């Protein structure tokens, strides 16, 4: 295996995760975007159980999209949640995570302490996560948050962050956003294979390596601000994102390596 592969994957993954903070501090609103990485949801739910006053509002968002089956599979493979699998078929991602929250955490106590839990089930992509979050908060009469923590699958954190910035760009006083992917995925080479190099995360609950590589490679073209990307010069789904030259270089090398091995 090319020794550049893990280094290039990790460089891109670190850029995409966009970890602005490595701990939870009080904010007006936490947005938990649905994904198959249950560790993200578990971290937020556990933090709220320990400190229910961590936020005034928790928005769990996610409808049914192309990645929803991966969430169903994650539930099925989890020793803790497998019993939920039969009852979640066809449910939106937010509703699946709501079941985890209600059945495995003291949701009633968290709500009683003043945390309003909002379930958003219409969004099917990062841009819609932002649009529907704003819509549902406003429809419920919840004041514009001054601070908002965005929790997303680390491979999509930067794009989701840019989507929220785009969505709130017309607000007189938009929230101060913080990206918190919970962890930054990292790989290392072991013998002739790539293995996970992350601590404090159930490795069985992560992506398979091929899907992870595909996700990482697929994000950079979306983030580009050109006619094919999601920026203002393309589809205009997100604000302009600067992609460093070393990240673009890693993407080019990794793409070429993948093409050679297929």
Image (spheres, rainbow, N blue to C red):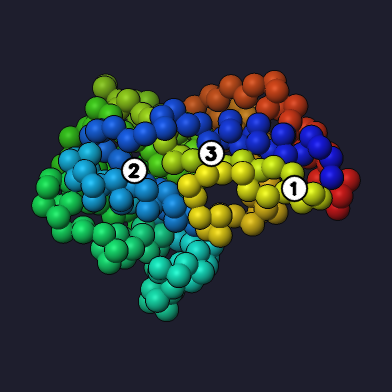
User: Would you place residue 111 above or below residue 104 in this image?
Assistant: above
Residue most extreme to the right: 260
Q: Quadrant of the N terminus?
A: top right
Left/right placement of residue 75 relative to residue 231 reads: left
How far is disc 1 from disc 2 in space, using C-alphas?
36 Å
Q: CA distance from mark 1 to mark 3?
A: 19 Å
| Residue 65 marker | none
SS at badge 3: loop
Q: Please tell me how crowded label 2 is: few (under 14), some (14-19), or many (20+) other residues with Cα within 10 Å.
A: many
- Residue with the mark numbered 2: 31
Identity of the residue drawn at 38% across and 73% down: 84
Numbered-mark total = 3
Residue 234 is drawn in which quadrant? Answer: top right
Give the residue displayed 44% in from the left and 52% down from the top: 39
- Where residue 167 appears, as percent x and y from the top left, is 39, 33
Q: Earlier in the sequence, mark 1 or mark 3?
A: 3
User: Residue 198: horizontal and vertical position, in percent?
Assistant: 56, 44
User: Looking at the picture, how far across and down is residue 61, in whole percent?
Assistant: 36, 51
> Relative to residue 168, is residue 226 drawn left or right?
right
Of 227 and 66, nearer the camera is 66
Q: Is residue 211 above or below residue 29?
A: below
**In the rendering, at what x and y percent does residue 213 appear?**
68, 47
- Disc nearer the start of the sequence (1/2): 2
* Label 2: element kind: strand
Structural distance between the alpha carbons of marks 3 and 2: 18 Å
Query: Which numbered circle lies on residue 184?
Result: 3
């Amino acid at each position: 295996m090319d020794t550049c592969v893990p280094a290039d994957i990790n460089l891109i993954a670190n850029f995409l995760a966009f970890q602005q903070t490595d701990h939870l501090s009080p904010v007006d609103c936490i947005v938990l975007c649905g994904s198959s990485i249950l560790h993200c949801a578990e971290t937020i739910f556990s933090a709220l159980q320990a400190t229910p006053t961590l936020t005034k509002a928790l928005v769990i968002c996610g409808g049914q999209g192309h990645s929803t089956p991966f969430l169903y599979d994650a539930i099925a493979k989890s020793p803790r949640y497998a019993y939920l699998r039969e009852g979640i078929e066809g449910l939106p991602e937010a509703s699946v995570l709501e079941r985890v929250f209600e059945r495995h955490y003291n949701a009633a106590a968290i709500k009683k302490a003043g945390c309003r839990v909002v379930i958003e089930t219409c969004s099917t992509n990062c841009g819609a996560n932002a649009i529907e979050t704003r819509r549902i908060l406003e429809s419920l009469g919840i004041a514009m948050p001054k601070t908002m923590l965005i929790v997303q699958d680390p491979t999509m954190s930067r794009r989701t962050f840019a989507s929220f910035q785009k969505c709130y760009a017309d607000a007189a006083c938009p929230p101060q956003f913080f990206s918190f992917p919970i962890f930054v995925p990292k790989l290392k080479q072991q013998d002739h294979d790539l293995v996970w190099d992350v601590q404090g995360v159930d490795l069985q609950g992560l992506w398979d390596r091929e899907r992870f590589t595909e996700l990482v490679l697929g994000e950079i073209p979306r983030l580009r601000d050109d006619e094919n990307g999601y920026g203002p010069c393309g589809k205009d789904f997100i604000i302009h994102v600067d992609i460093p030259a070393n990240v673009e270089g890693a993407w080019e090398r990794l793409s070429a390596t993948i093409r050679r091995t297929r």
